[in-house]
Image (cartoon, rainbow, N blue to C red):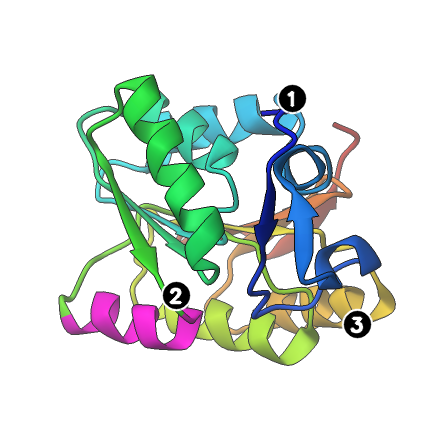
Amino acid sequence: MIRDKRIIEVTDLGTGSDMRKRNFRRVSEIARYSSVPKKYGNLLAGLSSEFGKASVIEFGTSLGISTMYMAAANPETIVYTMEGCPAISEIAKDNFAEAGLNNIKLLTGSFDKVLDKIEGEKIKAGLAFIDGNHRKEPTVEYFNRMVELSDGNTVIVIDDINYSPEMGEAWTEIRKNEKVSFTVDIFRMGLVFFREGMTRFDYIIRY
């Protein structure tokens, strides 16, 4: 994918870097700027294996790199992944087929509408990965909606918590949610836990 020089028309329903705002982009550029680095992919894989037994819900499929990490690590669960851009969604679909992963349910459309369907099916999340929109209000809204699909065994991961001051504000608001037991800030990502009986604390660690 890094060398894929195809140019596709991108429908960007979120807000990201200037690179993401262009209407036409090379697939190689999307792979370079939107895919999770290997060490974070391995982290998501480990979290999926440990906590994703109920299901995994991902906001922001992109080319499906993070999706495949989580699906491969937990082949007995379903990974529900949402992508707003039809052209990118088609590439991700091909990537999943090439990887031979059959436990991924790719949902194309705006996060709000797709999430309505997930809520309607009463799907519970073991692991949720929120990416794909880098604004405070939608990030907090998606987190709050995921809380309603969560229980004491759920972990919610917020990507790019230090991407901008606005995302920093979103992370601060999320940490204050009364249902949160503790959080872990690894700089790029924030991990949110809901374990009862745990002493409330916000950890910051180097990863």
- The three-letter amino acid code for the residue at tag 3 is Glu
- Graded by Cα atoms within 10 Å as few (under 14), some (14 to 19) or many (20 or more), the crowding at tag 3 reads some
Write the residue at 65% across / 21% down. Answer: 39
Write the residue at 57% across / 76% down. Answer: 138
Q: Which residue is mark 3?
A: 166
From the viewer's perspective, is 157 left or right of 67?
right
Check disc 3 and report its element: helix, strand or loop. helix
Kindly report the secondary structure that dominates the magenta region of the rendered protein.
helix
Q: Nearer the viewer, mark 1 or mark 2?
A: 1
Q: Which residue is mark 1?
A: 39
Q: Nearer the viewer, residue 195 or 147?
A: 147
- The three-letter amino acid code for the residue at tag 1 is Lys
Quadrant for residue 100, please give it.
top left
Check disc 2 and report its element: helix, strand or loop. helix
For the residues labelled 2 and 3, the Cα–Cα distance comes to: 20 Å
Q: Which residue is mark 2?
A: 146
Residue reaching furthest to the left: 121
Write the residue at 55% across / 65% down. Answer: 11
Q: Nearer the viewer, mark 2 or mark 3?
A: 3
**Residue 163, visible in the rendered structure:** no
**Residue 29 higher or lower than 190, as above or below:** above
Part of the protein shown in magenta: 110-120
